[in-house]
Amino acid sequence: MSAKLLLLEDDKLFNETLQDFLEEEGFAVDTALDPYTALDLTYSNIYDLYLFDVNLPYENGFDLLGKLRESQDVTPAIFLTSREDKASLHEGFGVGADDYMKKPVDLDELLLRIEAVLRRQIRQKYVQVGDYRLESMSKTLYDTSGNDLNISKKAVDLLILLLEAKGELVSMEMIRERLWASGQQASDGALRVYVTQLKKLFPDAIVNVRGLGYRWKA
């Protein structure tokens, strides 16, 4: 079954262009020109991915995704925007985006990014990982008795990234991009702390590929 996408873009011509392209690539696409219509569509449909413009009438795409995340909607989201400042990039990822593309959008690159997000995304709110339960929205790990293990959020981000890769190598560059927002200084020392936290829980599952990154050994 083809993935179902919700496209929110207030430029009618660009909206139609994207819809035509994505449908030709085999996706089922619902479209909206404003955030209120898009929000209504999320109540009546289940989507595999959101494609949201940022500069919109009434409220911006960041605000809309923030509302969806607050309601426990974990649907993957990619922002399409003409904004180029780092603050906007930081805000977009901060409200729960999975990727961020600057306009003008290269359609072939967009397709690759959509496929990558769909391939790696953990969709369930709760995921069983060995003897522990991962709550993906709050980024919390619980033991079998339901106790919070108090693992740092960045350590859980790393765990999710490793799980999403499904045994493939996760490069150091990918880890730095996921764990540290634009403008933040990535710390290899802090990363070693997060790896150590996870290895205490999953001693045989995290493989260090020296000089390259890490991978998850199921």
Image (cartoon, rainbow, N blue to C red):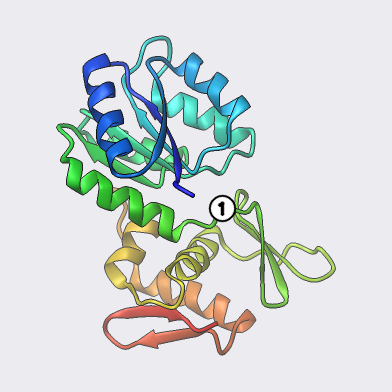
Residue 147's place in the image compared with 18, above or below, is below
Residue 12 placement: quadrant: top left
- Please state which of residues 187 and 42 is positioned toward the viewer in this rendering: 42
Residue 97's place in the image compared with 18, above or below, is below
Residue in view at x 41 percent, y 71 percent: 191
- Please state which of residues 101 and 20 is positioned toward the viewer in this rendering: 20
Disc 1 marks which amino acid? Arg
Residue in view at x 30 percent, y 57 percent: 185
- Please state which of residues 2 and 211 is positioned toward the viewer in this rendering: 2
Q: Report which residue position mark 1 lands on.
A: 123
**Does residue 24 show up?**
yes
**Does residue 180 show up?**
no
Q: Is residue 126 left or right of residue 173?
A: right
Q: Residues within 10 Å of mark 1 (few under 14, many from 20)?
A: some
Residue 77's place in the image compared with 145, above or below, is above
**Which element carries disc 1, helix, strand or loop?**
loop
- For this orientation, the residue located farthest to the right is 145
Task: Specify the quadrant that holds the C terminus.
Answer: bottom right
Residue in view at x 54 percent, y 23 percent: 41
Find residue 31 and report its horizontal and vertical position in percent: 40, 23
Find residue 101 and report its horizontal and vertical position in percent: 25, 40
Q: Is residue 142 left or right of residue 64?
A: right
Find residue 212 and report its horizontal and vertical position in percent: 28, 80
Find residue 66 and report its horizontal and vertical position in percent: 51, 31
Residue 18 placement: quadrant: top left
